[in-house]
Every structure is written in C-alpha cells, then in structure tokens.
Image: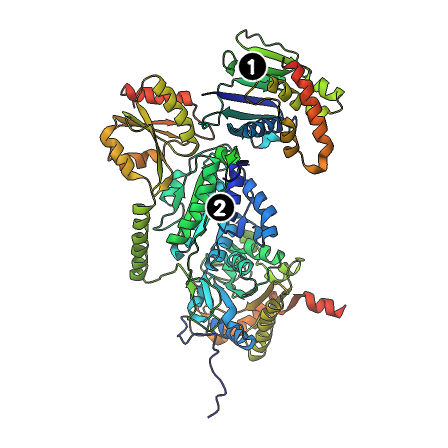
Amino acid sequence: MAERVLMKGNEAIAEAAIRAGCRHYFGYPITPQTEIAAYMAKKMPKIGGVFLQAESEIASINMVYGASAAGMRVMTSSSSPGISLKAEGLSYLAGSDIPAFVVNVQRGGPGLGGIQPSQADYFQATKGGGHGDYRMIVLAPASVQEMASLTIKGFDLADKYNMTAMILADGTIGQMMEPITFEEEEIRQYDKPWALTGHEGKRPHNVVNSLYLKPEELERKNFERYERYKLVEENEAMWEEYMMEDAEYCVVAFGIAARVAKNAVVSAREKGIKVGLIRPITLWPFPKKVLEQAAQRVKGFVCVELSMGQMIEDVRLATNCKRPVGLVCRSGGMVPSPDEVLAGIENAVKGVY
Amino acid sequence: MAVVFEKPKSLADLPLHYCPGCPHGIIHRLVAEALDELGIEGKAIGIAPVGCAVMAYDYFTCDMIESAHGRAPAVATGIKRCRPDNIVFTYQGDGDLASIGMAETVHAAARNENITIIFVNNAIYGMTGGQMAPTTLPGQVTQTSPYGRDVNHCGWPIRVSEMLATLEGPEYITRVAVNNVKNVMNAKKAIKKAFQNQVEGKGFSLVEVVSACPTNWGMTPEQALKWVDSDMLPYYPMGVYKDRSAAKEEK
Amino acid sequence: MKTTQILIAGFGGQGILFAGKFLAYKGLKEELQVSWLPSYGPEMRGGTANCNVILSDTPVGSPIITTPDVLMVMNLPSLQKYVDTVAPGGQIYVDSTLIQEKVTRTDVEVFYVPATQLARQAGAGSLANMVLVGSLLENHPELSFDGVDNVVSSMVPPKKAAMIELNMKVLTLGREYGK
C-alpha cells in the first residue's frame, strides 16, 4: 500500500495532474489556488514539462486551447474572478470539441468578492459561463484525497468525451491538509487523430475550429455534441450516499458543505432523527436518478450551500418538486456551522421549509 | 510547355472570399510561398484570427486552428510550447493584434516566443464593415469615426512595430507594404526571414504588412494603393525596427 | 470514537501554522485521521493567524472547528476572541509571557506557559510555539511524546539541521508546564 502523506488540496491537484500525464500548465496567480501554480513551477522543469505564467487568465486559457489542439494533456487553474475571464476560452474549447482540464478553487463573489471559500460559481460551472450551447463535466471534491482522484478522473473524462472537465472546489478544500495516498494507476491514452501535429504530407490538413457560418451546419454540430453529452449523463454521474438506507429526510450538499452536513447528520441521528445525506460528486452530470429515487422515500430535502442557493434548483428539478426542499446557506465566504445545518434538518422535521 | 508561374502548394485551390482589390490575397500568397520555399508546410501549424482573415484555416493547407479574437499569440504559445519542432505562425489584423489582443501580442514578444506573426495593418476593421481601428489615422473617416478620427477624443493610432522594438524580447520586427511590385518583393523577403528565424530557433519575429482596404476606405483598388503611399506610409514608415541577430553580427 | 479539535491562534509570524502542521504530522505518524486548515489571505502577513487541527480515530467530517477541545493562544486578541468557544472540560494553553490576562472560566483546564520567555532562554526566541506544543503533548496520550524527533526532522529542511536540536529542546521545556 502506498504511503499516507499530508498534502494541501491544491498541491494534491497538481501532483495528481502530473501523474495523469499532464506536462503543460498555463496559469495566472490568484488566491486561494496559487499553490497549484507554485507546485507546477517547481516540478514541471524537472520532468520535461512546461510551466508558464501567462499575462492573464484570458491568455492562459487560450494557451490551453492551443496546447490541447496540439494533442497534449494540459490544464489551467484559477479562482472565481479568473474563471469569469476564462469563460471565453471555455466556450471555444467546447465549440471545437477538444479536451481540457480546468480547476476553479472558488472564493466569494460577485465582483472581486473576497478570498474565503464559496460555492457560488455553481451556476457558472454547470449552466454555462461562456456563450453558446455547451456543457462541461463538473467534479466536486470534498476531501484532499478526492482532489487527487477526481483530477485523474477529470483528465480521463475530458479525453474520453472531448470536452472540458472542471474541478469545482473551494478555498477550504484547496487550503486544507489531509492525509492522502497516491496509488499507482494505469493512465489510459486516447487517440487524437484531430490533433495539430503538422501533416508532414501524410494526411489532409487538420483544422481545429468553432466557426460555422452556415446555421444548418452549426445546428448539426450542436446536435452531435449533445448526443455525446447524453452519453455522459447516462454513464458518468457520481455521488455518495450516507445513512440513506432508512432516511426520512435527505440533506443534499457537495464539497465542503457536505463535510459540514455530515457532522449535522450524525448529530441529528443522535437526536433520533432519521436523516441521511446525498453528496453529488459530479455536478454536471447531476445525479438526478438517485435524487428522484430518494424523493419516493423521504419526506423532505435540505440543501446546504455556500451560496444563496444554486444547486437547490437542480434538486427541485431532479425531484420534480415532489417533496419540499429547504435551504441552509451562507454566502460571501462564510461557511455554515454543523449546528446551523442541524437547525435546518429540525425545521424540515417540523415541516418548516 | 514549361510552367513559369503557379499557385504555391501551401495555398489551397479555393476561391478566396476577400473583396476585389484586397491585398489579403497577395499576403496569403507570400506566406504560402515562404512555407513552400523553406519546405516547412508539413510541419507548419497556423492560427487564424477573428477579422477578415478568419477563414484562413481553409486557405492554408497546413494544419490550422481558429482562435478567439486577439488571442492568436497565446494559442500559438500553447502550441509551440508543446511542439517546439513544429513551425507555428499567426495571421492577424490590426483590430485583432493591436486592440483586443495587444496584451497577448506584447507578452508573446517579451517572452521571445519562437513564433512568426504576420500582422496586416489596413487601418480599419474590415470584417465588421469599416469601424475605427487602433491604427486608423488621425482624421480618417470610418463608420465609428464619422467626422474623422479625433485624437483628443479617442487617442492616437498605435505604431506597433516601433513599440514592440523597444522590448528586449523579440528577435525581428519589421514593417513592409504590398502596394507596388517592389514593396511586394521586399515583403516576401521579410516574411521568409521571419519563418527562417523560427526554423533557426531565433525567436519572436513579426512582420507588419501595411495593407489596404478599398471597400471600407471607399476607394477604388488603385486609389487605395496610392493612399497607402500618400497617407499610410508617412505615419507607418517601412523598415527594420529590430533585428537582434543582424545587430550582433555588425558588432 | 475519540476526536480532538485543536484551535491555534496568534499573530502571523509566530509559527501558528507550523505548530498546527507539527500536530497534524504527529497525528499522521500515530495513524490517526487528521485535518489541518489554515486561515489564509492578507492576514497571513502580520495580522492574526489561526489554524484548525482535528485528530480523530474516525474519518474527519467538517475540518472547520467551531467548538475546540483545545485552544492554544499566543496573543491577547486571540484569547479574547476564542475563550468562550472552548468546549466545557476543554483545555487552554496560554503563552503567559505575551498574555497577562487570566482565564475566568472555571469549566476548562488552563495551562499558563511562559513560552516566549522559555524559548528565549533556550536561545530560540522564535520557537515559543513549540514550547506550547510540548505542553500540549504531555496531556495528549493519543499523540504521545515518543517519536517527536522523527516528526521534527521530517519538517525541518536539512539545511537548518541546527533547528532540529533547538526544537527538541523547547518541546522538552514545554512538557514540564503541561504536567
């Protein structure tokens, strides 16, 4: 068994990316994710990789676009305001149907906001951010170990479906240290016949492009893309269920909010309340089925979010509003305490949503 | 019968979409000839801009990528850093390179990225129908400077070559024109050198090509070529603004 | 199930985060589940700093501590801010060189350790944090004092080998005050 080491969440992402075969990192400094860049700056030159600090987030995502088009596993990382700047590139990557791996260690917003943890970029990550018809695979780690495992998974999914995989973490998970083990994993390689390599006179020229001036053609491209997205929705949803077997109430939370919610679930159980937790690990595709099934059994849901309530809309959609959904939320960099979540659960028991 | 003139191999056999009298065709040809003559088309990866040359990815036969507006030097950086043995070039207009993409341009130059940039300066936004560009001349009438560019209101046009030449980073910065045969021949030499520099690993090479836009300037092609001489070149003089290797040799 | 939640607070530059890291590494060596969460941002540069360390024999839920079992403080504002959050029956370790105020709560165990003074006398003025850690270790058999030398040497870069001995010296000095 591999050794347990203590690592920051941000560093775990960087190390896992290297293990996943990423040898190109382009980024721009922003709190609270700068450890990723620092780790890459140190490691990449020693393993024949490239770390480049770009002049802006816009430039860095476009360097990612170029490097991915050249057929490489490549990544960038940032935090909320920086991700807004990268939105342009995310749309181009999607429109060109090429893979990329992007990390958002969220901080409070909107605007310059703050630097404390947040989950308020849920809409931006799962509903768009950039322009046009597209999706990204959005992975929400809740521990340092998952920062690593979902990074490795993210690179694989990106290549498998030729789309962007985003880690949607937050300042807490990024900054905290926990024990972590890196198991030797087999990294799957994907053929990239579309990659820009120089044709050397051996094949027709490759073009990586998102421009289709004929609407019929653009529509066809978008329909094709959504066929692929359907496969992702059918096959790649991930979630964790905690104490759900006999649950009469269900807390729904991801990332750091799920960690806090777990404490509250334990406390509520001690008080005799039959409550469990569903933790979406993929935010897109959203684990609709498990929530739909839970709605058959439980009396109500409680969402816990570090935002004014964004995922709650997907919970309502997934359950067709069959059961009431309460919300425990803090915003702007504040994190709810387990007691606040417990109060939310107790309110649900009383029928107060 | 001996062939005395033919289409360069690096240029696809397609009708170009450019307006009658537009020099983009000439500049495309010069780039394609350079790729042919240096035998690098098979290794080349080109980056098309947003602007009139947006569909250059169809015209050049090498591998191509379409970039977001102004981001071509960043995309080129990403590719070149992954594939240092390939030949990477961008083809950009004035709005793309000197307005929205100025940061990407300056920083790619400062890093001395080993790439080649063909910068077409025709002092106007062509694709969108003739708006004021960062290189529009003082007093020049465009759709968004209908009373002539007022420098007190919207500032002065930017001389990109002179500005980039102040940086330590870049290898080669030159300005040429394509409004007469002699200038076209010089432009060809400069473009070829800009690619040769990359082959030799010398670094960032940018050729600013002073071009014309008869359609949006509201001129006949002939008038436009004359206007290049009378108005454009006095503000944007031709010449080599930086050539690090040549400067070293002189010493 | 045994979980210890430790909150360490003081000024930036006092080694608050390092003390927390040391406890986290020690916990790791004892095969406990651990989490270490720092305050981050501008306050790292001279303002207040704090860190949350959780040691448990079961997986750690929230890494954020709201009711610490142990509070370790190295300045007065931190004591005033956190004294009332400590769980009844908990412990408070106070650097009594820097904090003259006494804790008035009677439902907690308080250790007044002249940590800064002891560290200075040992010729290691910057290691008051580790004096307090030494006191804490004395009261926490789940961490124990055994093997601290290994943890210290794994955390101090080889270039600063002299620091290893100093760390060990002040940890030992602190033990006395934890009794």
Q: Which colour scheme is used?
A: rainbow
Q: Confirm or deny contact between disc 1 and disc 2 (CB under 8 A).
A: no
Circle 2 crowding by C-alpha within 10 Å: few under 14, some 14–19, many from 20: few
Residue receiving disc 2: A184
Callout 2: residue from which chain?
Answer: A
Give x and y (percent) for residue A49.
57, 53
**How far apart in space, not on screen, are marks 1 and 2 (Cα)?**
42 Å
In which quadrant of the rendered image does the C terminus of chain C lie?
Answer: top right
For this view, does C114 lie left or right of residue A281?
right
Which three-letter amino acid code belongs to the residue tagged 2? Glu
For this view, does A149 lie left or right of residue C73?
left
The residue sitting at 58% across, 67% down in the picture is: B207
Give x and y (percent) for residue C101.
63, 11
Q: Which residue lies furthest to the bottom in this view?
A: B1
- Checking the image for residue C91, the label placed there is 1
**Above/below status of C177 relative to A90:** above
**Above/below status of C40 relative to B192:** above
